[in-house]
Amino acid sequence: MVNVLIIKFHLRMSSQMHNAIFFNTYSLSERAISVVFGSDIDDSTLQQITQFNHTLHRKPFPGFYTTVPAYTTLTVFYDPLLVIQSDLPGTDCFDKVTHYLEQLKQHLAQDQPGLGKMITIPVCYGGTFGPDLKYVAASHGFTTDKVIDLHSSAIYKVYMIGFVPGFAYLGGMPEVLATPRLTTPRKAIPTGSVGIAGKQTGVYPLDTPGGWQLIGRTPLALFAASRSQPALLQAGDTIKFEPIPHHEFDLYRHHADTHH
Amino acid sequence: MQIRIIKPGILSTVQDLGRWNFLPQAVPVSGAMDALAARLANKVLGNDDNDAVIEFTYSSASFKAETDLLIAYSGDGALLKCDNQAIPTDRPVFVPAGNIVHLTNNPAGCRTYLAIAGGFDVPVVLGSRSTYTTAQLGGLHGRLLQSNDLLYNTSQLGLTTSKILNSLTGEHLKYPAWSLTSHAFLPSNRKIIRVVPGPEFTWFNSQSIINFLTTPFTLTSQSNRMGYQLEGPVINRRIHKELLSTAVTPGTIQVTGSGNPVLLMADCQTTGGYPRIAQVAAVDVPLCGQLKPGDQIQFEEISRQKAEMLYIEQEQQLQKLTHAIKSKYA
């Protein structure tokens, strides 16, 4: 039994390495294939994924329906029945889709770069909106204004959307702001709360429990099912936080409501 | 057609086959946990597979026929009764107005799907009628069904559905002599779950892999529509790399830091950061939808090619079934 498994390990690993030379893909399920673009979180990987994703949406294969971009992978979902019935070369869905994606990647260089949007997110820092701002400032020996300044002058990249609908994994927070999570998570965090957890910063799109240090809140809806694109942010977007006075919070809300 | 929920039971929601197009925005697939049962209940009514059904969890629920109804049910969570008369599964059933239908205990499984002629009429939200309670999306107001909720069918019935209805309409509970043999689609031992090695399969040590594939695992009480925590031998890693969050999907089996597997189900997140030891074969995911805390399952390895072949064969059989029902009522 053990020997059989060890042999299987070797076969599997060698076939993976073989794939890596040409085009690194793996099967996630009967309906999904992941394409691997790198091994670390970095801008060039993000750009490749964004560009490939953009191209695939413009040139889909029969049976394609959606993708999930992540830090180093783009996972491609499809309907196996439509793929197997298509005339794409290959004996099974995995071969057919991998072959198509491989071809697509080769033509990528001549393609337009898939640039993300630039989005400014207004934030009311501190007070009842950011109950942990003082703690975050004190733990680094900063004034609260200094924390606001550092947080709102950085440019952030949206690496991926995950965890809950509309939640963006952002890169680009100044490392001096890194603060550990709360030891006891809060039972409910209001929608729009802006928080810090370790080296990450992010915005809660829904009322959920959580352990992030809350430094402010945005009046923008990060996720609204009523919009044609419900999530405000998408992988590949660039964002900036802009401090706004507390009395403007409701103005934004009102403004947003009148547009629904 | 209209039904009134009398007792909602533990967890009852409107579901279809899921919300697939908003995965990039981290909206879970949702949909029926036992999608095969949901589809069969729809098929026997001449509905589309994707029409909205009610997913009941266990029994102790009941509903009233406010009008004459043409319904069907499938799945192993409950047996339906009307006036102490058992209603058979997997076939169309006419229920005259005024009757109350009770769900009674069926120890075989967990979830039961109620389909209605034309499907339940709730708004399509982000391309699906499935309920996802965390974001209050879909279904009836994005929430669990409650007492006194009224649910309607869509009034436009297809030709097959209309013919089935005409053949059964009358004063009494009525159903045809035929039924689907849903068991034809299910393996004889439904506690054996076939899996394909996952992308991080080789991150685990040989002994743990052997344990994973030879020792039963038990569903803990930490099991819901998002996923099941499994208890069994601790699974240890041989490679201690950090996995950067990447896509997961219903049927993915992750192993947490404590070495326990988690089987992700319909409402799972779209991405995860735990290594994925295996992926349940798509044809066996519906079996998982019938599992309940305390159930023991045994994983069995099959190849990716075999899993894909099983899936395509089953889909082709299901298509034939649709044609068979259509031609029966042509």
Image (spheres, rainbow, N blue to C red):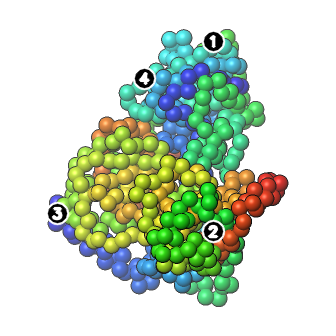
Residue denoted by label 2:
A234
Q: Which mark is residue B172?
A: 1
- Label 1 sits on a secondary structure element that is loop
Nearer to us in this view, A209 or A49? A209
In-image side of B140 versus A159 (left or right): right
Residue B22 in picture, x, y percent from top left: 62, 58
Mark 4 or 1, nearer chain start: 4
Q: Chain of mark 3?
A: A
Q: Nearer the viewer, residue B78 or B58?
A: B58
**Number of residues whose C-alpha sits closer than 10 Å to that of mark 3, classed few (under 14), some (14–19) or many (20 or more):** few
Same subunit: marks 2 and 3: yes
Tell me the amino acid under the disc marked 4: Asn
**Distance from label 2 to label 3 (Cα)?**
45 Å
Real-space Cα distance between discs 1 and 3? 62 Å
Q: Which residue is tagged 4?
A: B105
| Type of amino acid at the residue the image marks with label 3 | Val
**Is residue A19 shown above or below A219?**
below
Which disc number belongs to residue A2? Answer: 3
Residue at 50%, 11% in the rendered image:
B84
Between the residue at mark 1 and the residue at mark 2, the CA separation in whole angstroms equals 55 Å
